[in-house]
């Protein structure tokens, strides 16, 4: 079974600067990590490989420093990886990102199963996975909470719906977006990290895309218009109270009543 996992490098903090003109996050110089949801997708892929055999590849789109999440995936057990990077891809919304990813996946190879995390912590749209499947013209199943089994040419999964669980059989090739409760991700192996720290990575730029229409990529190819985006404002206030236990209780009660947390 040939498995591909789409992963992404996201900011490791909510204190991220935003470009006021474009509404795009300024990622340079910001601590980054692998998108937490993608860890579950990667673990799902590794478990499928262990059970049915095959390979697990990983692909990401981002600036050159996004290589870090590929090497983290190698340390967890991934076999090979690819980075899609080019300044022309910068500022992409979900549609432009999906176009770029689908083009990169076509360049990377053919796969039986493509796995994505349900969403990312920096966008929270949960749209990229299904859009990539649409652009690749393959079936997709979202909100997967369990892999039942893989058969010859297909896979059976449980999809978490608002009011029930649906069991779906999808033919290969297909794309699945998985939930966080599907499994517990393993920790990276120090030994594998040492063994793969210089592993070659395929790098794809705009010139490697089959579709070379620049109007479809990056900020230019993004139909979504962001009116305003900003980091959350911290309004925490600390107040030190002194007094006896009765006095402190009265002060806390008065404060809660003033802020209308309690009535009476």
Image (cartoon, rainbow, N blue to C red):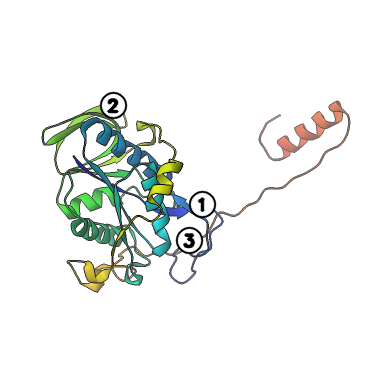
* In the image, residue 141 above or below residue 165: below
Q: CA distance from mark 3 to mark 2?
A: 35 Å
Q: Identify the residue position indicated by label 2 in the image.
A: 164
Specify whether residue 157 is in view. no
The image position of residue 44, as x and y in percent, is 31, 36
The image position of residue 103, as x and y in percent, is 21, 60
Residue 229 badge: 3
Residue appearing at x 37%, y 52% in the figure: 70
Nearer the observer, 126 or 254: 126
Among the 4 quarters of the image, the one containing residue 47: top left
Circle 2 — which element? loop
The image position of residue 192, as x and y in percent, is 40, 44
Mark 1 or mark 2: whose residue is earlier in sequence: 1
* In the image, residue 219 above or below residue 251: below
Residue appearing at x 41%, y 35% in the figure: 186
Residue appearing at x 46%, y 42% in the figure: 190
Q: Quarter holding the N terminus?
A: top left
Q: Comparing marks 1 and 2, which lies closer to the viewer?
A: 1
Instruction: For the residues labelled 1 and 3, say whether their Cβ atoms are less than 8 Å apart.
Output: no
The image position of residue 111, as x and y in percent, is 18, 47
Task: Using residue 123 as the reference point, say whether residue 148 is left or right of it.
Answer: left
Q: Identify the residue position indicated by label 1 in the image.
A: 12
């Amino acid at each position: 079974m040939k498995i591909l996992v789409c992963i992404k490098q996201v900011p490791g903090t909510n204190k991220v600067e935003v470009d006021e003109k474009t509404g795009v996050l300024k990622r340079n110089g910001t601590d980054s990590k692998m998108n937490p949801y993608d860890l579950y997708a990667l673990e799902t892929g590794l478990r499928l490989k262990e059970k049915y055999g095959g390979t697990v590849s990983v692909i990401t789109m981002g600036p050159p420093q996004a290589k870090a999440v590929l090497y983290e995936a190698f340390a967890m057990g991934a076999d090979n990886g690819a980075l899609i990077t080019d300044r022309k891809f910068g500022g992409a919304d979900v549609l432009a990102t999906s176009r770029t990813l689908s083009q990169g996946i076509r360049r990377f190879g053919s796969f039986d199963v493509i796995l994505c995390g349900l969403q990312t912590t920096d966008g929270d749209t949960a749209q990229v996975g299904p859009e990539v499947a649409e652009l690749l013209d393959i079936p997709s199943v979202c909100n997967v909470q369990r892999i039942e089994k893989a058969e010859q040419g297909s896979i059976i999964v449980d999809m978490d719906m608002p009011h029930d669980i649906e069991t779906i059989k999808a033919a290969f090739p297909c794309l699945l977006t998985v939930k966080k409760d599907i499994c517990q991700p393993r920790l990276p192996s120090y030994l594998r990290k040492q063994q793969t720290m210089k592993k070659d990575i395929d790098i794809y730029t705009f010139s490697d895309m089959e579709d070379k229409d620049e109007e479809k990529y990056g900020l230019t190819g993004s139909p979504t218009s962001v009116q305003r985006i900003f980091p959350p404002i911290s309004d925490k206030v600390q107040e030190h109270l002194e007094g006896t236990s009765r006095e402190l209780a009265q002060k806390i009660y008065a404060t809660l009543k003033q802020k209308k947390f309690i009535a009476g």
